Image (tube, coloured by chain):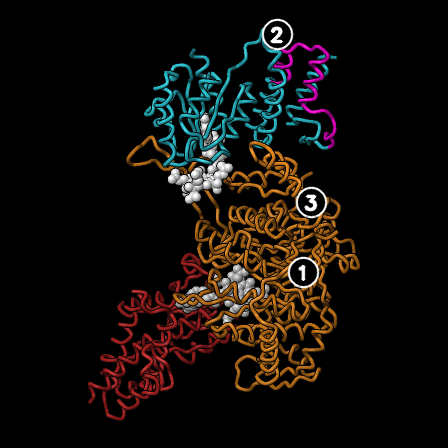
Amino acid sequence: MTEDLLVKIKENVIQGRKTKDDMGIDESLSGTPGVLELTESAISDSVSPDSIIIEALTPGMEIVGEKYSKKEYFIPDMLASADAVGAAMDVLKPLLEKSNVETKGKFVIATVKGDIHDIGKNIVAILLKGAGYQVIDIGTDASEDKIVDVIRQENPEYLGLSALLTTTMKEMDTIIKALKENKLRDKVKVLIGGAAVSDEYAREIGADAFCADGFEAIKVLEKCQAA
Amino acid sequence: MPREGILIEKPLERLSCEQVQQIHDASIEILNNLGLLCFNKNAAKIYQGSGAAVSKVSGSNIPCWHIKIPEKLVTAALDSAPCTVTLGARNPDNALVMRGDEPRVYFITGSETNTWLDVDFPTYVSKADPKKEIKIPEFKPRRGTVADLCDSAHVCEHLETVDGYIRTVNIQDKDINEDNKDVNKYFACLNNTTKHVMSGLTNLKQLDDVVKMAEIIAGGRDNLKNNPLISFITCLVKSPLQFVDDTTETFMEVCKRGLPIVVSSSPQAGTSAPIKEAGILAQINAEVLAGITLGQLVNKGTPVLYGTVPVRARMDTLGDSYGSVETSQYNIDCAQMARFYSLPNYSTSGVCDVKIPGQQSSIERLFSDILVTLSGPQFLHCAFGLLDCNSVFCLLQAVLDNAHFKMIKFFLKSPGINEQELETVKKQIRDVVATPQKMFINYIRPVMRTGEISPPYPFEGEGDSDSVFALANGHLQELLAKPVEHIDRATTAKIYREIPGLLPRLNVYKGG
Amino acid sequence: MSSNIIELIRENVIQGRVTKDDEGIEEGMAGQPGVTELVEEALASGADVSEVISKGLTASMEVVGQKFETGEYFIPDMLASAEAVGAAMEILKPHLQKSGIKPKGKILIATVKGDIHDIGKNIVIILLRGAGYQVKDIGNNIEAKDIVKAVREEKPDYLGLSALLTSTMVSMEDTIQALEESGLRDKVKIIIGGAPVSEEYAREIGADGYGADGFHAVSVIEALNDSE
Ligand code: B12
Ligand code: B12
């Protein structure tokens, strides 16, 4: 029975179905419970959150990743799966805290002041959630004060900044300086991204990494965890 | 005498009259029932004062209003927005007259790319036969500078098919900052081309300096009104259905000054708009109508272009796919919608997904360039030199683009069939058939040099070699060496006196 | 007077005007006498025939050739000039012997049996005429025996054969065979052309030369002429 639920969760992750209303790739699944409902059933069946993550969500996402590399899946498929996993993680979060399971970490993400581009940032947020991070999105046009406040309150391990304009990318520099002034710089790893910035720029302003896309962000974060 | 552009006698249309009406109705319904989010306080106020239903959105971390626009406001705006928009030029012969009800196409450069692509032709030696050497073009990206912008405007001044100039490259010199970027950007363009100059604004604070510069060049405020040699573009709407704070502010300020401006929306089908043609059309049309309505409320009768940059998402990155077939479909439809409203349309073609010039770039750009031109948008941002979805600019590519636009223009000449012509050719046929050789060669000669025969592809190689890039590069060097008419010494001096922030190195008269 | 008319001939060859009805490259020339009228006039006024040819025709064709090479002239210009020269030579022909000028030679040309392609052949004819040869076109789709008959009757110095089809190029070999059988092969130099044939094929079937295009045809024949 438990086995069965975990298999179904995994399968629905692969199908990218968050709720019963979602369409998967296999049309016959429409109407049947999605990852969110299945995770809730599993919890009420007292399946351990650990095994939901380790036996269903993570291996499901791994298969999705493989399918994407083989070009069988496109980004929208990947995002749907990541979104489903993200939703499941939200449900599991209080339980994990209770059972003292370590989560992968908190990630605050924002598009900097003066910039309203957010398609890329939103994609990164979904992918990170799907990879098991707790993501706090503070939106676009975020000033350094706002970011400093959020970092102080939320105490995240990571901060992700997005800028698409060459005129707004220097806000990243301003933000990092503000973090330093507030003695927060050491508490958080800063990742930057967006079409305007580069590896070189990350080094120049003292960010911890530049990521070309969401997948690279996941890799970088994994490295941070291993270290 | 404005530039001629190219008149499309039978515009290519995909939508039936009924479908056009349906899209219009859907957009009106979206504006009236669903409404837009507005992050700009002044815009919200103006809408409120004009009878739109405006309410403050609570719980948003940035101030935000919800605006529902009734149909009558849109109808009034469509009535007062001028059908004809004139974009002037430093040389008045380069002015562009765009009539919303006439599908006359002007080809204009575009975008603000961060990356500039240099070309080099290193020599490679064959491993099998060391005597065999070939030159292969190598493209090297770097960040764009103001000197590049000058070169780009200079070359575009000489490219015959370029009717107007949008700054192609983002100036990222160390001494360029938010406070001097716009004046330098406009000056670099205006000083190196006598064609119309359009750009976006980085910083509203520089608007008045930019306008003043244009007034000095035009010879006063009234002259600028009659010959608006600069214009602006703003993405005031962020899809789906949101008025952005800063660009909306810029938009309203430009409208107040009565200078031409593009109301542009760039939804990406799949991410910020529905993937289906009906969906992205209903949405983009609603977004542009909302912008136009705002502009007319700010300053009734101010010239606006119906600006549409619809694009489909790539499935592998969710970046733009300008090279996709659907992107051309959406653009063609938008040209038809603008014509329905009798407003000049700002449209896009020719942007390709690939990062360097080559076969993919040629195929993707020609496909959309031909089709979208045929749909008859008045202002066609046709991506001279642009690559990598608008992120990269390459002058060599611009030279290649000019060659194919010449072909497209030639193709669009009217067939010229009439009684007199038929009489002449019937006689020709009779005469030739009576000769032993039966060849018309002699009749080619009178038209061979009049431009009535399309020239061969200008970068055709000899024998079976493909030397297109090398030949185009040769032509490019010639164009760079050919002088352009800069702004005269006295005017330049006046501009430098009155406009703060201009870089001394852009003054061509310094030192003498 | 006569130097003046030679100058006019020269100018009109360069303009490619055969008769007074032709337009030249410059506008407004239509109506004024063309090369044929001018040559007639020159003859009537007793001009020196060799001078008309060397200064009026040959030298001006060289100018045309240069203009073609520099890209100023296109093939139709070249052909018009060649045609004008050809027409002039036709008028001058009866006067050549009298003036002690050795004519450049007579060429017979045909598209071989089974083949009706003649655009290339026609171009070759115009250019050869322009180069001063007397060319007789016996048409297209011509049987080997008819070519043999024409060679016997016309006694040309050269025979040009054109074929555009791989299936008809073998007719060239048949034609050469037939000439040999009739004992005429030694009397005439044979040059072949057309898209499917080649230098190699010419050797294979025992032709004397191969011309890749009209200009090449002229130089090949000139070379055969010199080697005599
Ligand atoms: C869509 C778009 C818009 C939309 C934005 C919609 C939205 N919701 O975001 C609209 C139309 C509103 C818009 C407006 C403007 N835009 Co715009 N826009 C673009 C465009 C075409 C695509 C951006 C995009 O969404 N790409 C797709 C996503 C998936 O890719 P991405 O953003 O790069 O994100 C990926 C990576 O970069 C990375 N990443 C991104 N962020 C982060 C963050 C972290 C932490 C990590 C790890 C990774 C990461 O991962 C993402 C996923 O793979 C770009 C051109 C381009 N090629 O980039 C221009 C572009 C960025 N815009 C440009 C301009 C000029 C503007 C305007 C100023 C125009 C104007 N004059 O009004 C305004 C800006 C207003 C403002 N204050 O910001 C220029 C910028 C040039 C410059 N000066 O730097 C560009 C480059 C276009 C051009 N060539 O002219 N724009
Ligand atoms: C035009 C044309 C026709 C025209 C001919 C019109 C005319 N008045 O000549 C029409 C439409 C009638 C035609 C018909 C056919 N054609 Co056709 N035709 C061609 C085409 C497209 C161009 C030929 C041409 O005029 N070229 C332009 C001239 C300027 O070049 P040129 O002929 O090569 O001549 C130059 C040189 O070769 C040289 N030269 C030529 N002759 C000579 C002679 C001498 C003595 C010298 C020194 C030099 C010389 O100097 C010339 C000037 O520079 C060719 C394709 C090609 N690329 O060659 C096919 C082609 C020759 N045709 C072809 C075919 C198959 C046919 C048909 C059989 C089609 C059919 N199924 O009905 C018929 C043939 C009927 C027949 N019995 O001959 C094929 C032949 C393939 C093969 N098997 O060899 C070709 C190659 C096309 C193809 N790729 O399929 N054709």
- The CA distance from mark 1 to mark 2 is 77 Å
Find numbered disc 2 in the image and state the secondary structure of the residue it sits on.
Answer: loop
Q: The red chain is which one?
A: A
Ligand 2 is found in which quarter of the picture?
Answer: top left
Mark 2: few, some, or many residues within 10 Å (few <14, many ≥20)? few
Identity, as a three-letter code, of the amino acid under mark 3 = Glu
Q: Find out whether residue C137 is within the magenta segment.
A: no
User: B148 or C46: nearer the eye?
Assistant: C46
Give the labeled residue for mark 2. Answer: C99
Mark number, residue B221:
none
- The CA distance from mark 2 to mark 3 is 47 Å
Quadrant into which the C terminus of chain C falls: top left
Tell me if residue B180 comes above or below residue A136 in the rendering: above
Residue A112 can be seen, yes or no: no
Give the labeled residue for mark 3. Answer: B423
**Residue C54: quadrant of the picture:** top right
Quadrant into which the N terminus of chain C falls: top right
Identity, as a three-letter code, of the amino acid under mark 1 = Ser
Find numbered disc 3 in the image and state the secondary structure of the residue it sits on.
Answer: helix
**Residue C4: quadrant of the picture:** top right
Find numbered disc 1 in the image and state the secondary structure of the residue it sits on.
Answer: strand
Q: Position of residue A25 (x, y in %)?
A: 33, 76
Q: Find out whether residue C35 is within the magenta segment.
A: yes
Chain B, which colour? orange
* Chief SS of the magenta region: helix
Give the labeled residue for mark 1. Answer: B231
> Which range is magenta?
C28-57
Q: Nearer the viewer, mark 1 or mark 2?
A: 2
Q: Position of residue B442 (x, y in %)?
A: 62, 34
